[in-house]
Image (cartoon, rainbow, N blue to C red):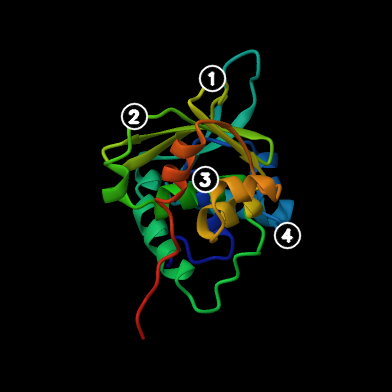
Amino acid sequence: MDLVGERWALLIIRELLLGPRRFGEIRGALVGLSANILTQRLEGLEKAGILERRQLPSPSNAQVYGLTKWGQAAEEPIFALSRWAAGSPAHDTTLPLSNTAFMLSLRTMMNREGARTMPSVDLGFRVGGEPFRARIVEGMLEIDRVDPDGADLVLIGQPSPLASVFYGRDSLAESQRLGKVAVSGDMSLGQRFVDLFALPTFGG
């Protein structure tokens, strides 16, 4: 907690788990985070060795923030906390999600044993207008920020409605009819994929 206990620190790390981001991209994903506080947190996380600043090659030449190898290892503790929090009796599925948070929820909540029975499939997403591509590898969902065009199955929507597609009760076809998601590709394959997800439950 001495390393990541300050407000926003873990959320900033979460936003970097899928790769380096620019200052404005991090701030835009975290509603309510001021530029001043973000600067302070980035400096603190860099000093702790959790992230590092990098310069993108020409022609971009933009400065981005990315996790160090050690910082990336925070993925499993963050996912464990996410699974625990998602099982809260007071969990509010209507709260806003960043695009990255939604995609990481899929990586966190997917039934790994069930995923091993899925055929090899190239999965594409456009979440809040941001492109992602994913594939299941040994029961894990590997995710990259790349264009989904040409994927076997493409799901398009805003993060919160998409979360209700994966963690709600409606079928994929019904969710599409309700406007929660636009689907391109094999609907039966899409339903099999959606069926791999559920919010955790804890007894007592």
Q: Do the residues labelled 2 and 4 touch (CB within 8 Å)?
A: no
Residue 81's x, y, as percent? 41, 64
Q: Do the residues labelled 1 and 3 touch (CB within 8 Å)?
A: no
The kind of residue on which mark 1 rests is Gly
Tag shown at residue 32: 4
Residue at position x 68%, y 46% in the image: 177
Quadrant in the picture for the C terminus: bottom left
Q: Which of marks 3 and 2 is nearer the N terminus?
A: 3
Tag shown at residue 150: 1
Q: How far apart are marks 1 and 4 (CA)?
A: 36 Å
The kind of residue on which mark 3 rests is Met
Callout count:
4
Residue at position x 48%, y 48% in the image: 104
The kind of residue on which mark 2 rests is Ser
Front tag of 3 and 2: 2
Front tag of 1 and 3: 1
Q: Decide which of 29, 3 is in the foreground and name it.
A: 29
Dot 2 corresponds to which residue?
A: 120
Q: Are marks 1 and 4 in contact (CB under 8 Å)?
A: no
Q: Decide which of 81, 59 is in the foreground and name it.
A: 81
Q: Which of marks 1 and 3 is nearer the N terminus?
A: 3
Count residues near mark 4 (Cα–Cα under 10 Å), then give few for <14, some for 14-19, many for 20+.
few
Q: How far apart are marks 3 and 4 (CA)?
A: 21 Å
